[in-house]
Every structure is written in structure tokens, then in C-alpha cells.
Image: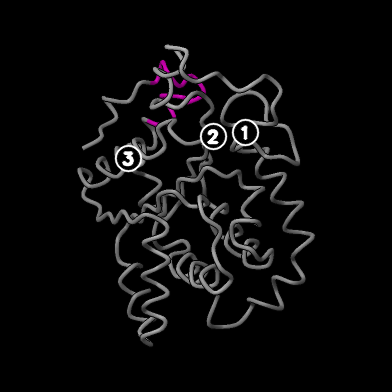
Amino acid sequence: MKELAGFDFEAQPSIDPKQIRDLAASHWIANGGNVLLLGPPGVGKTHLSIALGREAILAGYTVQFPAATTLVAGLAKAHGERRLGEKLLTLSKPKLLIVDELGYLQLEPDAAHLFFQLVSRRYETGAMLITSNRSVADWVTVFADPVVATAILDRLLHHSDVLTIRGDSYRLRAKRKSGLIKPPPAGDGPPVGSASLRPVTGGNNLQTRSYSRWWGQFFMTQRGRFRMAFDTPSNM
């Protein structure tokens, strides 16, 4: 079982240990908030998500931890068997739902709509922790539909902490030291997890505000389409 005590913060200086300790107190779970852990593969996103889930359990909260592909496959199966409502009810019960590795594979439009229904069902009532190798700005690509992406991000980012991890993969660091793998050339594009429409500078608070400013602009451009597609009593 991954624990916070076993996480190497010195190897990932982009992470603020105090912010992680604050999240480990689990107050955000009680308030139905969300946490997004963003960064390239191997930087410790899954380790932190498991550790924060463990702390939540120790604090008395119920936790469920599916991989994104497993979660979406389960929703699609339930939909095909005409028991989607039952599945969504089951997934709405844990106080914390951890979704690991969202974004490694693009979701089909139908799957994206199912994921939206899950996020909508848990909005402000059940906390979610999502790990992803994609920046928030790239989630339009992940969900293959800007309207669905807008609706999902609108709910997830409303009460959220967005943490971006920059650094080498734990799994590849030893290989690089031995010379078996060459490091990527400098200036090879922005780090995964940074908002591409606004540069992210400074600490985590500035980073989160940058996401908020970008999201405000993006939402305003999509607001009309969002309302037409989703402002129905069943999705409120």
C-alpha cells in the first residue's frame, strides 16, 4: 500500500509537501471537492492518489479506486444492459471516487457522455480525485467533444485543487543516470499539465488561479452550446 511517508518529495520539487499534507487531512472530501493530479507518466500521481485515498479511509470515509478505462467500460456495459441508473447510484455512494489515468486513451463520444453523467451525479455531493497525463486545456481532445468537455470541467473545477507535477519518471530515472535513455532536448514544448493558453508561473496558488482564468475564458466561449445541450432538469 502506497503511503505519503514513502513518497520522495525531494525527487519531485514541483510538489508542495504542505499542500499534500493539507489534502491528506481530507477536509475537501467532506465538502465534496475535487483534486486533479496532472503530469507525465511515472512522476508519482498514482502513488499520491493511493496515499490520499488511504488517508481518507483512515479518516472514516468510503473510497473507491477504479482505473479510468475500467470505470468507463463499466458504465458502457451498464448502459447497454439498461441499468445505467443503478450503476450511477452505486458510483455516487463512496465519499471519494479516485479515477486513475484519465486521458491515456481518448474516450468515444458515447463514453464521454456517460462520464459526464457520473461527474454530474457526484457534483458537490461526492469528492473526486482524478489523475491524468493531459493538461486541462487538452481535455477537449480526451473527451472528443468540446461541449461535453466544457460540462465536465465546469463541475470538476468549481471546487478543486489542481496540482501539476513536473519532473523525471521514477521508473526511467535510473535508466537515464546509466545513460541507457537520453533526456529530452530542452525547449521541447510546455510540460504536461501546464495550461497552454496562459503560462503558469510561481507556486501552486498561482498555478490554480491560472487554470481558473483559462477556464473562465474557455467557458464563456462555450456557454451557449453548453446550455443548449445540458441545461435540462435531469442534469441540474
Contact? badges 3 and 2 (CB < 8 Å)? no
Q: Who comes first in sequence, dot 3 or dot 1?
A: 3
**Relative to 66, is 171 above or below?**
above
| Residue sitting at x 42%, y 57% | 68
Q: Who comes first in sequence, dot 3 or dot 2?
A: 3
- For the residues carrying marks 3 and 2, which lies nearer the camera in this image? 2
The C terminus - image quarter: bottom right
Q: Is residue 103 left or right of residue 87?
A: right
Amino acid bearing label 2: Thr
Contact? badges 1 and 2 (CB < 8 Å)? yes
| Percent of width and height locating residue 40 | 52, 35
Q: Who comes first in sequence, dot 1 or dot 2?
A: 2
The N terminus - image quarter: top left
Neighbor class of circle 2 (other Cα within 10 Å; few <14, some 14-19, many 20+) is: many
Query: On the image, numbered disc 1 is attached to which residue?
Result: 207
Q: Secondary structure at mark 3?
A: helix
* Residue 52 tag number: 3
State the residue lying farthest toward the right. 221
Amino acid bearing label 1: Gln
**Relative to 190, is 31 above or below?**
below
Neighbor class of circle 1 (other Cα within 10 Å; few <14, some 14-19, many 20+) is: many
Query: On the image, numbered disc 2 is attached to which residue?
Result: 164
Amino acid bearing label 3: Leu
